[in-house]
Amino acid sequence: MGTSGRLSQSLLRFAQKLAGDVPVRLAGDGAAEEPERPAIVVHDPRVLRALLLNPEVGFGDGYSDGQIDVEGDLVSFLENAYRQPARFSSLVISRWLDWIQANTLRGSRRNIHHHYDLSSDFYRLWLDRQMVYTCAYFPKADATLEDAQTAKMDLVCRKVWLRPEETVVEAGCGWGALALHMARHYGVRVKAFNISHEQIMFARERAKREGLSSRVEFIEDDCRNISGRFDAFVSVGMLEHLGSKNYLEFGRVIHRTIGDCGRGLLHFIGRNYPRAFSVWIRKRIFPGAYAPSLQEAMNVLEPQNFSVLHVENLRAHYAKTLEHWLSRFEQSYQAVVETFGPRFARMWRLYLAGSIAAFRVGGLQLFQVVFAGNKCTSRPLTWSNLYTGAEEPVQEKKWIHAIS
């Protein structure tokens, strides 16, 4: 064995030590000793140095570049990896990313553009028909993704106790599905804010096509610039894009829009305790992302004297949502490769698989928090309405025909 070979074997032993009980081997060294166990297969020994310097980023980039493969089920491998004790801190890189990806008004626009303005056609390959890119709610285990996303939107609407002709402001509206759902099925008027140009144009076109432009206004602006008074405030999948340093300001925005008489809902990816978000995901997929603990999220509500009325964790539902997304992504994998290239396709496969694993093992949570001002009178005495009949398909309200 030459010097380079001995060095590779030495690096491999160090990599195996870092990986714990996750097997690591060089390609060509034979099949795994336990075929049923997923293992890391290294095609290019040079990637071992990157694995040792920063296992998370080294693995993520090595997998994306095809220098590393996983032998066996990718999600199962990542679940096992996430259960291993942390052996490396990316604190320096994390703080550097905090600085260059800061969610200022300009920085947030840049961060959002990186992720959401890829192409609506890309997301259409693997999302549901309404293009809902947040956790679904599965009233039945065998519910379709389409039905589960509709059930989630109804759950949100029931939690904020919407009534016809009320006004709602939505912070971060994606491709517009929830805003349109609230207007069509609950008779409210909605102003929805988003800084993704691609998503706003998609949402406006859909509202026009479906005859709802008079009831839903899609505004291309940062949610921190929201003005006006509303009955309810809804934020689904927005909080994790703000960063904890901006929570106090976000709370002020909410209070100036609904005051002490309104109510609202925050739906966000969170954690059981404060911890930096994945460095690799922030570098390659989701710049500026941060998943807060419940305690951190209260910094949005407590300074404004909002009362927390209901808290629910839909972690298992997000794991199931992601399973649907990954399955659809794999069915469209070749189309993704042809449009964006193999590195991009492998990168997104890893991102979706890693997200499933994180929700399965509890590294990530999905919180829904319902809150209200201390003078709010429009709220239910009990929460029995939330799940009663949740499995039934939503019917258009009779009054909608009079306004369409």
Image (cartoon, rainbow, N blue to C red):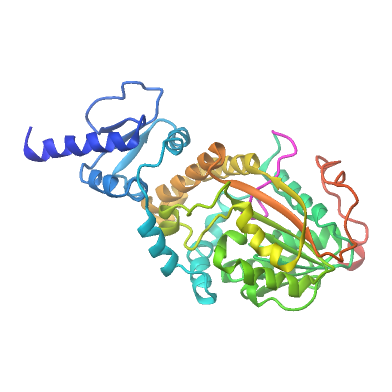
Q: Nearer the viewer, residue 350 or 147?
A: 350
Residue 63 shows in this picture:
yes
Residue 60 position in % (x across, y down): 37, 48
The image quarter containing residue 40 is top left
160 relative to 13 in the view: left or right: right
Q: Residue at x 81, y 65 (%)?
A: 373
- Does 176 appear above or below 151? below
Q: Residue at x 79, y 70 (%)?
A: 258
198 relative to 282 in the view: left or right: right
Residue 132 shows in this picture:
no
Main SS of the magenta segment? loop
Residue 279 position in % (x across, y down): 41, 54
Residue 47 position in % (x across, y down): 25, 46
Residue 101 in magenta?
no
Please identify the quadrant where the N terminus is shown. top left
- Magenta-colored span: 129-141
- Does 179 appear above or below 310? below
Residue 384 position in % (x across, y down): 87, 43
Please identify the quadrant where the C terminus is shown. bottom right
Q: Residue at x 88, y 57 (%)?
A: 379
Residue 140 in magenta?
yes
